[in-house]
Image (spheres, rainbow, N blue to C red):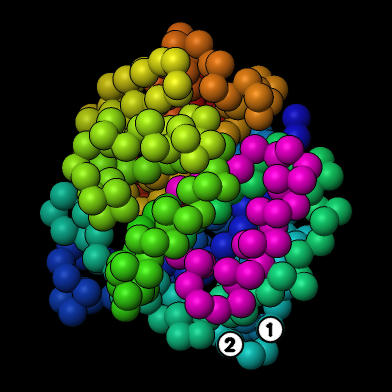
Amino acid sequence: MKKLLAIGEALIDMIPSNVGKIMNVNSFSPKVGGAPLNVCGAYSKLGGVSNIITMLGNDPFGDKIIKELEDFNVHVDYVKRTDLANTSLAFVALDEHANREFSFYRKMGADMLLSEKDINPEWFLDAYALHFCSVSLGEFPMRKAHDRALEIAKEKNIVISFDPNVRLPLFEDYEYLRKTINEYINYADILKISDEEVEFIFESKNIEDVLDSLFEKGVKLIIYTAGKEGATAYTKHVKVYSEGKRVKAVDTTGAGDGFIGCLLYQLAKDKVELEDLERLKENQLKHYLDIANKFCAISVTKEGAIASYPTFEELK
C-alpha cells in the first residue's frame, strides 16, 4: 500500500476547557493539529503510511508536534525546523453545539516559511496521493512550496486531493482567498468541500450548480460533506449519498480532515488509481462514504483531532 503525502500547516490547537467565546474560556489544552497533518493522522491510525511536509519552529511546541506525530506513526522525515519563527498556534472556542471560533497566532508562523527549495522530488516516488488545503496558500513562501509539490505530483501521476478548509480569520482579503481556491481547484483530482464553504467559494448555495464547471476543470471525484446530515459523492457518472451518524458531539475539530483521510486510506488500500476515480461504482462509493461517516462520528465524541481518531480495529 502506497503512502500519503500532505503539505501545509502543522500547528497546536489550543482546545478550550469550557463552552463559550474565546474571551470567556478559562483555560486551554494544547493538542497537535493543522488540517494536512490531521489527514496524515487519520491515514496512519487506520494502518497506512503517511508523511507530512511542513516546517516547525525550534521551540517546545515544535518538539511536541514531532513527538506526538511519531507516537501516531506519522512520519516526520520531511519536516523542516527553523529559528526564524515560532510554531503556529490556533486557539479554538466551542459553542453548545460544538461549532468553532478561531484565533490564530501565526504572523509569521514557522510553517509559512517552507519554500520550494525544501521540496524533494524523491519524496513522491512511492506516494499514492498528495493532499493540501488553502490555509497555506497566502502570499508567503509556503505557497511556492505547494506549487512545486503539485508540479511533481502531476508529473508522477499521483492522485491530488484538495480540501479548501476555508479559514477566513487568516485572510484579510476574502476575494484573494476565493480566487486562489478556484485557481488551485485546477490541480485537484479529488475535491472535498463542506456545506459551509460552497457559497463563499462558488457564490452559489447549491454544490450541484457548479458540478459541471468542476468536472471541466479536471476534478474526477467531488466529496460534499454536511456534518450530521451526511455526505454526498459525485463523479461525472454517479451521485451517491451516505446518511450521517447522529452522536453527541464533544469537539468537531478535525472531523472533516478525518473524513478525507479515511476516504484516501480506503482508496489507497483498494488500489484505486488516478484513472479509476471517475469510474468508481455507486455501491463502492457508498461503502467508502459510510465508513468515513462512521470514522467522523467516533472522532467528534472525543477532544482533539488525531487523538480522537479511531484505529481500524476501533472502527470495526
Question: Residue drawn 42% across and 66% down?
Answer: 13
Q: Which amino acid type is marked by label 1? A: Thr
Res 57 → quadrant: bottom right
Residue 311 coordinates in the image, percent (x, y): 55, 34
Question: Residue drawn 29% across and 49% down?
Answer: 202
The image's mark for residue 82 is: 1
Compared across the picture, whether 188 is left or right of 237 comes to right
Q: Please name the residue that numbered disc 2 is placed on.
A: 85
- Is residue 64 visible to the viewer in this orientation of the structure? no
**Is 75 in the magenta?**
no
Image quadrant in which the N terminus is located: top right
From the viewer's side, name the closer residue of 210 and 99.
Answer: 210
Residue 73 coordinates in the image, percent (x, y): 68, 48
Q: Secondary structure at mark 2?
A: loop
- Is residue 172 visible to the viewer in this orientation of the structure? yes
Q: Give the alpha-carbon distance from disc 1 to disc 2, as whole Å.
A: 7 Å
Q: Which residues are magenta?
A: 135-163
Residue 109 coordinates in the image, percent (x, y): 52, 80
Q: Residues within 10 Å of mark 2 (few under 14, many from 20)?
A: many
Q: Residues within 10 Å of mark 1 (few under 14, many from 20)?
A: some
Could you tell me if the residues under marks 1 and 2 are in contact, i.e. CB atoms within 8 Å? Answer: yes
